[in-house]
Image (tube, rainbow, N blue to C red):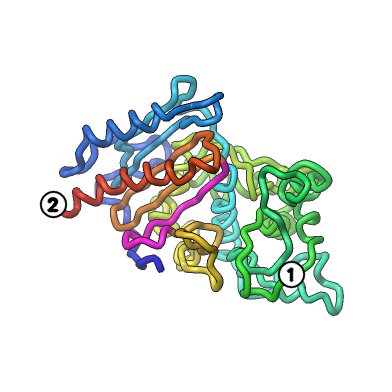
Amino acid sequence: MMTRVPLPGQPAGVPWPTRTWPVGEPPDGVDSAALTALLDETFAEPQPAETERTHAMLVVQGGRLVAERYAPEFGPADTQPSWSMAKSMLHATVGTLVRDGRLDPATPAAVPAWQSPGDARGRITLDQLLHMTAGLHFVEDYVDDQISDVIKMLLRPGYDDMAAFAASFPADHSPDTVFNYSSGTSNIISGIVRDLVGPGDAYQRFLQRELFERLGMTSATPKFDRSGTWIASSYCFCTPRDFARFGLLYLRDGIWEGERILPAGWVEHARTHAPVQPEGEHGYGAHWWLANDDLGTFMASGYEGQALVIVPALDLMVVRNGKTPAERGLHVWQLYERIINLFRAATAT
């Protein structure tokens, strides 16, 4: 299990990046030449048939941007896809409603299709949806359109109302007995938010007012389905610097410029292990992945290698956007670990 590491505050004298990111050098003890070499290696990865690309990589330490690199055809103003990093943004969105007393994660989720008498799904809580332990049937496959429920949801027949499509699936298991990573679950949650704040333009205004504008995320562009539901499983386009702004909100325990954006304990909620865990090295909290290391690392992660890696013990973040096939995912994660280890080594000297 991951070591619980305190979340660091914004260092004295370092401005918040609401308008522009403060820029600095890596701290004393970090091998800057080795960091540059790692970025060189990252952007020199083999790129067969243009299917493996790193588009952007940022390193933020102590609230300052200490390294930034882009592929030749990209720059700081170019937006990149979030894919499933949007799920972690959805966790923040729910947090703003919890803060205002409009949602309670411990209560049954307000899903219209589950309200019939005797429907066992009516007992599923919002918290179980956030933890991916609701027990709902959903096949998260990105290749085989014959078995994939996520492809059917994002394209046809589910595109018109993705929340309703995902909510129509039966429960295969009792809640909190099986972990099932599901983009459908995220869109069910987004449908709950839509019903509270309004669809389409009203939902977008809510996101802008409660989250994006407060952080200075001027590029953030969520995508909505025809029902006006934010497709929070998959789509919020941002510049890498805006992804980093979002990450800093979580690294700073939901506080921005002295104001509490997320309720007290909400970031802890994100990085506390779900009742049932996925197989493999990484754990899962509430719409955030957990590295299970001694640095308290937790991550927003998306298809094709999108990543926001937050390392509380080192006051460090790594943002990466690109297009990398799943079979190369471990290789990309090992690059993050090598960057992290450069900063870890500096704290040990």
Q: Residue at x 70, y 55 (%)?
A: 139
* SS under mark 2: loop
Residue type at mark 2?
Answer: Thr
Residue type at mark 1?
Answer: Asp
Q: Which mark is residue 102?
A: none
Check disc 2 and report the residue beneath it.
349
Q: Residue furthest left?
A: 349
Closest to the observer: 348 or 252? 348
Image coords of residue 207 (percent x, y): 61, 48
Q: Alpha-carbon distance for marks 1 and 2?
A: 52 Å
Tag 1 near tag 2, CB within 8 Å: no
Segment tinted magenta in the rendering? 291-303
Q: Residue at x 57, y 43 (%)?
A: 303
Residue 179 appears in which quarter of the rendering? bottom right
Is residue 294 on the magenta stretch? yes
Q: Residue furthest top?
A: 72
Q: Which mark is residue 172?
A: 1
